[in-house]
Amino acid sequence: MRKSSKDFEPLINREAPPVVERMGLTWLIGAAIATTLLWQVPGGDYILYPFTILATWFHEMGHGLMALLLGGQFQRLEIFSNGSGVATYGLRSSWGPIGPALVAAAGPMGPPLAGAVLILASRSFRAASLSLKILGSFLLFSALIWVRSLFGLVAIPLLGLIILGIALKAPRWAQGFAIQFLGVQACISTYHQLDYLFSYSAGSLGLSDTAQMQRYLILPYWFWGGLMAIASLVILVQSLRVAYRS
C-alpha cells in the first residue's frame, strides 16, 4: 500500500532522520576539535569571538547563580571586549569554607553543565526550540538585571536576540543542530581557559578560581584544575552519548 507524505509528518515532527543525526554528530565532534585547535593559535579567538563571549557569560553567571542558590547576593556582572568578565556577589558566612569554594567552582563548571543541558535538549525538536527561547530570553534578562559593563550591555542582548531569532525563524532541524553546537562550544570552552585553570593568579583580579578552591579546600589549585578539565570532557562525552542514543 502506497503511503502519502502526510503519513510521515508525525515522524518528521518528532525526530530528525537518522542520517542527519549521524552527520550531525560527526560534524559536531569535528567542530569541537577544530574549535579547541583554533583557540590555541594566534587569531583563532577572532573567529570564535561570539562563543568566547557566551562562554564568559556562562562562567560568570555560574558564580552569581551559585551565590544566589546559597542564599547570597548576585550584585553585578561585567563582561569586557577582551573576553574576560567579573561577577560581584555576596555570600553568607554560615556556609563556612564550603560556600566560597562552591561559588568558585561554579564558574569553570558553569559552561560545561549548561552545554550538557543544551545538548540533551536536542533529543526533542520541541525541547530544542524551547531551550533556545529560554537561553535567548535569559541573556536579555541578565542584561537587564545584572550586566553593568558597557560592552556587556551591547554584546549580551545582541547574542540573546540572535538566539531568539534562530528559535523563532529557523527550521526545526536547524534549531536542534544549533542547540547542540552551542552546547558543544560551551562544554569545550573549559579548554580555552586551560591556562587559567592551572594558574594560581588571575592577574589584577586576584586569585584564580582554582586558587580560591585551594584556599578553602586545602588541596592544591592544579588538582582542582585537572579535576574540572576531566569532568568537562566526561560531561561532554556523556551528554552526546545520551543525545544520540537510538
Image (cartoon, rainbow, N blue to C red):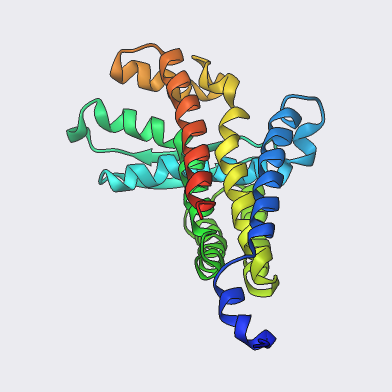
* Residue 77 seen by the camera: no
Please tell me whether residue 198 is drawn above or below residue 192 in the rendered image: above
* Residue 88 seen by the camera: yes
In percent of the image, x 45 and y 36: which residue is there?
109
Residue 42 or 180: which is nearer the viewer?
A: 180
* In this rendering, position of residue 57 left or right of residue 181: left
In percent of the image, x 48 and y 22: which residue is there?
208
Outermost residue, left side: 94
Residue 201 percent coordinates (x, y): 51, 16
Residue 82 percent coordinates (x, y): 69, 35
Outermost residue, front side: 1
Residue 239 percent coordinates (x, y): 49, 45
Residue 197 percent coordinates (x, y): 52, 22
In percent of the image, x 30 and y 20: which residue is there?
216
Q: Quadrant of the N terminus?
A: bottom right
Residue 32 or 80: which is nearer the viewer?
A: 32
In percent of the image, x 79 and y 38: which residue is there?
46
Outermost residue, right side: 43
* In this rendering, position of residue 174 left or right of residue 135: right
* In this rendering, position of residue 152 left or right of residue 109: right
Please tell me whether residue 189 is drawn above or below residue 220 in the rendered image: below
Count of all numbered marks drawn on residues in the image: 0
